[in-house]
Image (tube, coloured by chain):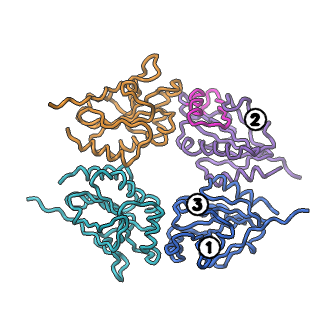
Chain colours: A purple, B orange, C blue, D cyan
């Protein structure tokens, strides 16, 4: 008997940019998904992680990989508002769908960040076609390794 | 007869970070001053110009050069507020004095930016010991050229 | 009826470094092979292409991908001798197998370079498990794209 | 009474590139001189030190600073011959005068390298207008610091 895979927790997003419709992991089941959690004032995200996720979004445009940026604000809440994020997205010319991780009222950590027990930003989470987490990494990722991981997830039909 | 040099316009700052006292060009007369005008959501500033000004601040610490960062917000005003700038300074570990260019109420361009007719960010303005502008550059500057320019300004006693 | 794939031409190597035995595409049939053609005095190879091939060699160490460096000297023959290449390999700490492309006596272009009609260095050629050329690229390659291509070749069992 | 400065040892060069006449510190007295000692197979030189010296050569072209590259071969002698250096200079488009440090027959260390007791490559030596060594550094140098040091040497009339 094969056990069902442990399905990745759903994302909770209070506002979307670069997407006319809300995205959900449930609706994306059957496709691989790369979640890039970042903060617009996190130097490692700005210099490396976020451009890397945007590059993946563009490079795999013809595949059915879905890249999702997730703005997981857990510090400087007054500075990293949706209006500030919108300006950031404009200035950095980001085209991937980006969701604002739902602030958990009164809590420091937003909802999705809590569900995944992320350690900080940037965090990269790769979800396979069957909805299970294939990889969960914190900090800088190597481009070549990420490219290989994404290609393997894309080729991995359930 | 020697003409008086054309003195650089005074800076207008509504709030200071990394300085317990307000700075003014008038009070700094006799010392060379590097003004680095930037915006916290300007990619070229974040990646290059602002770290370069911070490096100059640290490299010439034992000279009497004064490096001043100037947050000249001319776009995305709702995003680049002083509270956002404070978070930016914290995250990027900036230690040079940074002033918020005085917003000209109802105008898009802040006061100092207007006085110097800056074309955008980053802008680098070097002021000599006699108070005159030695150099006014827009865009990315080369580290070696800037180092040479600063050393020349420092050695240039009036 | 399925046609046999066009098999990649065999490599011709006059001397090996970092390999105690000669390698051949015939013997490697069934495994994916990345050929990195370079010259030790080609700036684009030294700065980017050769470190990238070495990185692939290390990153995919646990797969059956075979990375092969090929020193395809087509200019400055008196400078890029095997003894010079040996020093280069030592100084740049290269660990992938590297073959000297067989000089075609009296000809400017060495044998393997001619067989593949390479346009210059760096050239990256990816050969699939069935021995056919999957990709032939000249110039700088993106790390993420290469990682994806290698992973696809590795997952592609015949 | 002011002591005469300790004059920098003369350079010993067996062959010049990019200069139709031999250069000597004696003939350059009165001008500042930047000596960049390198080896064409030293990764830190190729990636950073040598392009930096070339940049200084171009940036200060209108001053009387003299930049001199010095090929101080102390390892892999069979690989880093003058003919190999010539190809290196061509491929990396170096335009500064470059001298081959005179091999001390039977010795590992060439003559100039020995006179200056250099510790390896890259080494950067700055000589003032009075012929005295102003700075002797081993390893990577910061562009901004070097620019400042060169400007100070240029402005320092004896």
Which quadrant holds residue B3? top left
Task: Count residues near mark 3 (Cα–Cα under 10 Å), then give few for <14, some for 14-19, many for 20+.
Answer: many
- Residue A102, horizontal then vertical, whole percent: 66, 30
What chain does mark 2 sit on?
A: A
Q: Quadrant of the N terminus of chain D?
A: bottom left
> Which is nearer the N-term, disc 3 or disc 1?
3
Can see residue B34? no
Q: Which numbered marker is on residue C110?
A: 1
What crowding class fits label 2: few (fewer than 14 Cα within 10 Å), some (14-19), or many (20 or more)?
A: few
Reading the image, the residue beneath label 2 is A24
Which quadrant, please, contains the C terminus of chain D?
bottom left
Q: CA distance from mark 2 to mark 3?
A: 39 Å
The spot of residue C116 in percent (x, y) is 68, 67
Position of C67 compared to B155: left or right? right
Give the SS element for disc 3: helix
Secondary structure state at the residue bearing disc 2? loop
Mark linked to residue C49: 3
- As rendered, which of C105 and C126 lies closer to the eye? C105
Residue range in magenta is A80-108
Q: Secondary structure at mark 1?
A: loop
On what subunit does the disc labeled 3 rest?
A: C
Q: Residues within 10 Å of mark 1 (few under 14, many from 20)?
A: many
| B147 w.r.t. A77: above or below | below
Residue under the point 27% across and 40% down: B64
Q: Is residue D38 magenta?
A: no
Q: Nearer the viewer, residue C48 or A36?
A: C48
Distance between mark 2 and mark 1 Cα atoms: 55 Å
Q: Is residue D124 visible?
A: yes
């Amino acid at each position: 008997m094969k056990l069902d895979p442990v399905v990745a927790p759903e994302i909770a997003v209070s506002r979307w940019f670069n997407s006319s419709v809300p995205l959900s992991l449930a609706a994306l089941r059957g496709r691989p998904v790369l979640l890039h959690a970042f903060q617009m004032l996190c130097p490692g995200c700005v210099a490396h992680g976020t451009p890397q996720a945007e590059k993946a979004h563009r490079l795999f445009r013809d595949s059915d990989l879905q890249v999702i940026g997730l703005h997981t604000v857990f510090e400087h809440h007054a500075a990293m508002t949706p209006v500030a994020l919108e300006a950031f997205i404009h200035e950095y010319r980001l085209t991937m769908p980006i969701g604002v991780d739902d602030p958990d009222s009164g809590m420091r950590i937003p909802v999705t960040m809590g569900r995944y027990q992320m350690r900080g930003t940037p965090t990269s989470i790769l979800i396979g076609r069957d909805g299970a987490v294939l990889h969960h990494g914190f900090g800088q990722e190597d481009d070549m390794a990420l490219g290989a991981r994404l290609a393997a997830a894309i080729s991995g039909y359930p």
